[in-house]
Image: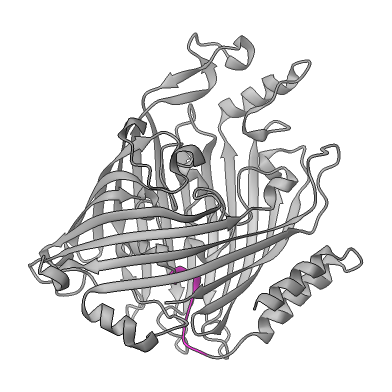
Amino acid sequence: MRALLTVIMELYCQKHVSRTKAWLVIIIAGMFLCSQATAQTFQDNSNSDARLRVATPLMAHPSNGPVVPPFSRPEALFTDPFGMTSWLRTRGIALTMDNTNEFTAAISSPTPGHPDYKQGASNAGQMNTALHINWEKVIGLKGFATHTLFTSRYGTTANRMMGDWLAHSSEIYGGGGNVVVHLVTAYGEENLLGGRVSIAGGRLTEMSEFSASSLFCNFQNNGFCGRPKAAIDNQYITSYPAGEWGFRVRGRPSRYIYIQAGVYFAERGIYANSQHRTGFHFNSSNIVGQLAPIELGWEPLLGHQHKLPGHYKIGGQVISAPNPDNYYDAQGQPYALSGRAARTHQQTWSTWFEIDQKLLHHSYSNAEGGLTAMTGIIYNDPRTSLRNYETYVAFVDRGFIRSRPYDSFGVVMTYVKIAPGVSDTDMLDLSMIPAKTAPNHATGVQGHVTVFEANYQIHVMRGVVFAPDFQIYFHPNAQKNLKNVEFIGFKSQIQIL
């Protein structure tokens, strides 16, 4: 595998080789690696456990006592090395490890007139280690489990070379920095009444459970993978790999309905290396407010044979922490003109409505096989947001080729509208003589951006997935003065344990 990646990267560096040929080499090389095996997809990685627990309806006949839901056991390269995995799991301990790698290269030249922009390629990756412990099996503490997740990240992303700072072409970039060990989450969870009530507290990642789906990371672009980017538009909202102190309660009044709410403590600099490079910085002096999300979800199993799962969710949150206005200063004047600091809002908000529904099931595939459609919208407070709203449409078809029942094809298109105050501030900054530096690395007025992505996930062997990927940015960085940019690359994942 390493040799293959080396050849591909060298190919990109050879100017006499066309980008089209390089793209074909990636696809052919990926198909060359294929072999039949059991199913493995990108949604099965270590950091999906919290999302999977939200997305799993209550069992048909739950008990009335405390219970720890089964830990996920993704298909792995090493199924049960020396019997270690089975020995640990029978004692209530689940250890999973995976490596994800993402490579992107621009196949179009950057917009002329910007000497800092360049046509280049990048690679980013991470190693995840998750530890789940069922304390009922360990010491008899009924219904109680702990979940701890570490990551190690490396690399960079190519979209910034072309002037875009809104949607990373490689999702695995930022947050944890280039660091050997970064603590993502460490929390306890108690499940009562047969799973009807779940209570969690500790170092949590809010967007792993709210506005969340394990399907998002069937793709690579950070505008969608992990969660739609507008869902974490506020500086205090935590998403993988950032964690913060929090408390969450989820109830399931019926088998297919849940409602959850939480309180998370807003911390300054949750994505900044100076405060949270390792994730072990627990200084309470960083806490400046609270976030209070709430979400209602319906998770039906549709179809004649009840094999078409769906997830319908609506939610929102109030953020009580200092946030700057994106246009006005404290005197009600545009801060771009007055030179004064932006007005501070002590409360702001965000909302979301999201759907995914399997439309058909391929009988010759495994339980995950079939065509799934996804859509949604995230709408944020226009006074304090960068992304006023984001909407998306996606399709994932797993196993549509009978001879390749564990492969998957996916397409997604996202549209982001920049908040009016941000656009107006850009206009004022850039109209001055000499022009001032606009926020968000803008070199033009920011308005809207559309990103399209398509990939094909190749199930190489047990625990290994390789996906050639294509992305195109329409108005990178939401600027009309920047030409459209196309990227090709791949995403790979090795589930080790």
Residue at figure coordinates x 17%, y 67% from the top left: 135
| Residue 207 picture location, percent across and down | 39, 50
Image quadrant of residue 337? top right
Q: Nearer the viewer, residue 390 or 439?
A: 439
Give the residues in magenta.
Answer: 37-44
- 426 over 255 or under it: above or below: above
Which secondary structure dominates the residues rendered in magenta? loop
Give the residue displayed 42% in from the left and 80% down from the top. 75
In this picture, residue 260 sits left or right of residue 241: left
Q: Quadrant of residue 92?
A: bottom left
Q: Where is residue 264 in the image (x, y as percent from the top left)?
A: 30, 41
Vertical relation: 382 (above or below) 154: above
Q: Please identify the residue farthest to the left as the structure is shown.
A: 64
Q: Is residue 105 left or right of residue 332?
A: right
The quadrant of the picture occupied by the N terminus is bottom right
Rendered view: 448 above or below 2 = above
For the point 69% across and 60% down, which residue is it?
A: 104
Q: Position of residue 481 (x, y in %)?
A: 77, 37
- In this view, 324 is above or below 107: above
- Magenta stretch holds residue 457: no
Q: Where is residue 277 in the image (x, y as percent from the top left)?
A: 47, 45
Instruction: Tell me, yes or no, whether the highlighted magenta stretch contains residue 40.
Output: yes
